[in-house]
Amino acid sequence: MTPFHLKIVTPDGLIFDGQAEELIVRTTGGDVGILARHMDYVAPLGMGRAVIVSGGQRRTAACIGGMVSVCKGEVTLVPTTFEWAEKIDKERAEAAYQKAEKVLHDENASDTELRLAEAKLHRALVRKSVASGL
C-alpha cells in the first residue's frame, strides 16, 4: 500500500508522527477509512476504536472525541483522548464502568448526572473493548 503522512496530536502532546498505510477511525457519522490520496476531508470524532497500519504493522487504540482532517494528502488526527490498546489500564477501565453503572441505577441521580454517567459508561466500554482486542 502507498503510505501517507499521519500525525496524531492530543492535548497531552504528540502521539504519532510518521508514515501510515491506513487509518480507520470512528466519526460522529460512523467509521471512516483513510488511505493515500484520500480527498480533502474534515470530520468530528466520536468514541471508538482507531486502527493504524504503519510499516505493515496494525495497531489499535481507543480514540475519543476531537477531529480528523485530510488536507493535500496530509492526515491529522486530533482526538481528545487516545490510548494505544497495550497501554490501557484494564482495571481502571473496569472501575470506571462499574462507577458509571452505579450512577445509572441510582434513582436519585439528576438528569445531568445520568447523561454524564452514560458518556463515561460508553468511554469505559470502548476502552475495555480495545484493551481486550474485541
Image (cartoon, helix red, strand yellow):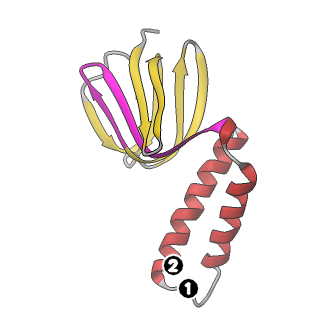
Q: Is residue 71 magenta?
A: yes
Q: Main secondary structure of the magenta part?
A: strand
Is residue 39 rendered to the left or right of residue 125? left
Residue 10, placed above or below residue 105: above
Q: Which residues are magenta?
A: 67-85
**Residue at position x 58%, y 13% from top?**
56
Q: Is residue 114 magenta?
A: no
**Residue at position x 47%, y 44% from top?**
12
Identify the residue position indicated by label 1 in the image. Answer: 109
Identify the residue position indicated by label 2 in the image. Answer: 113
Residue 34 is marked as none
Q: Are marks 1 and 2 in contact (CB under 8 Å)?
A: yes
Is residue 129 rendered to the left or right of residue 7? right
Is residue 93 rendered to the left or right of residue 6? right
User: Mark 2: which secondary structure?
Assistant: helix
Percent position of residue 84, x then y? 60, 36
Percent position of residue 104, x then y? 61, 76
Badge 1: residue crowd in 10 Å (few <14, some 14–19, many ≥20): some
The quadrant of the picture occupied by the C terminus is top right
Percent position of residue 65, x then y? 42, 50
Residue nearest the viewer, comparing 105 with 69: 69
User: Mark 1: which secondary structure?
Assistant: loop
Residue 120 sits in quarter: bottom right
